[in-house]
Image (spheres, helix red, strand yellow):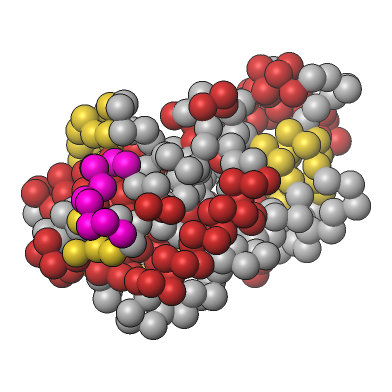
Amino acid sequence: MTHSFILAPDSFKESMTAKEAVTAMSKGIRHVFPDAIIHQIPLADGGEGTLDVISEHADYEKVTRQVMGPFCDEVVSAIFLYNQKNKTAILELAQTSGLELVAKAKRTPLTTTTFGTGQCVLEAVKLGAKKIILAVGGSATHDLGFGILQACGVRFFTKQHVQLPNGQLDLSKIATWNSDTIDSSIRDLEVIVASDVENPLYGIQGAAQVFAKQKGATANEILQLEKETIRLAQTFNQNKHDLQTAGMGAAGGILFGLSLVNERCRRISGIDWVLDEVNLERYVTKETIVFTGEGKIDCQTEQGKVIAGVIQRLATYQVPIVAFGGSVEKDLDLQGITACFSITPTPISLKEALRDGADNLTYTVEQVCRILV
């Protein structure tokens, strides 16, 4: 019997990209089944690595531009995808305003900006883009998307009507704005925010209280961000958007800012979009075994993450789905998963776990495969 595998993991954050994960999985399978049929389908849910996944399966040109990074005094080389035929650009916020671009000691959402992401939007428009898909996972920011608006021409002012400099938007200093100065093409764009996050803009499940800590904010800074988010939402929400809409809190409130100037702005599920692009189902047969995974498998896994997306997409096929994680929350009951394995073999430091992730994944996959012999 020839075994057939679909390898469809997310990245293992700070340890392996999704592509490196499928390579490690393949190695473990080959140790047991040298002649196995293996379909390598690295995935992403709208976070870092999304562009790499999409570019493997769709006809997009890679475009590189120098733009502002998460801090206004840094420049990064950012890549986005562009399809001239359908006038569509795909941007990955992690490329320009991502957490992994910031050293841990410097992480703070009080001063990081999405200005560089806005610069990429303008560069895509210059190429002729009429539609922007913005994958927003992995952000280092909590600026309500105002950095993007500022890059596109919106001016923000203090109470004294002093214009705030480009890339420097302390939320506590913003009192008024002038959106009439925005690049006219931005209002006409179709803007789609791809995200795995369903949190509202503020509140106990909102952007600041749930995500600001991992971006480097202290407890007092989280309270400050929450306060300013509520104030600015009340100040600028002239179109009366529902601020409790699912996904409004993604990437530090980016959907809120964009929706203020673009009535065509909407959110989609990042993993559903990616799965549509890669057409995962076409590889399924009656003999298929699916291996998926991510860095941490916990209660958030079911909330729009890659593993949940794979489970939902393949539910009707009734094939075995095995998940691998750097760590696995105890007593977690993931409906649709056949089995779930931690790849960490013994008590080790986080540094060691991240360093040896690929080897540990290969070993664990090999042991699972030996059960199938």
At a point 29% along the width and 41% down the height, the residue shown is 167
Whether residue 181 is visible here, answered yes or no, is: yes
- Residue nearest the observer in this picture, 174 or 258: 174
For image coordinates 85% across by 24% down, the residue present is: 345
Residue 221 highlighted magenta (yes or no): no
Q: Is residue 301 above or below residue 15?
A: below
Q: In the rendered image, which quarter contains the C terminus?
A: top right
Q: Give the overall secondary structure of the magenta segment.
A: loop
> Image height check: is 196 above or below 22?
below
Q: Quadrant of the N terminus?
A: top right
- How far from the left and from the top, in percent, is residue 200? 55, 68
Residue 274 appearing in the image: no
Residue 219 spot, x, y in % from top left:
68, 46
Does residue 253 appear left or right of residue 308 in this picture? left
Q: Residue at x 71, y 18 (%)?
A: 351
The span picked out in magenta is 159-168
**Is residue 162 a member of the stretch shown in magenta?**
yes
Image quadrant assignment for residue 149: bottom left
Q: Residue at x 75, y 61 (%)?
A: 336
- Report the front residue among 30 and 217: 217
For the view shown, which residue lies furthest in the front direction? Answer: 160
Total marks in image: 0
| Direction bottom: furthest residue | 240
Between residue 316 and residue 350, name the one nearer to us: 350
**Viewer-proximal residue, 51 or 264?**
264
Residue 184 picture location, percent across and down:
10, 64
Residue 23: percent from the left, percent from the top? Answer: 56, 27
Compared across the picture, whether 285 is left or right of 240 comes to: right
**Residue 82 falls left or right of residue 70:** left
Q: Quadrant of residue 129?
A: bottom left
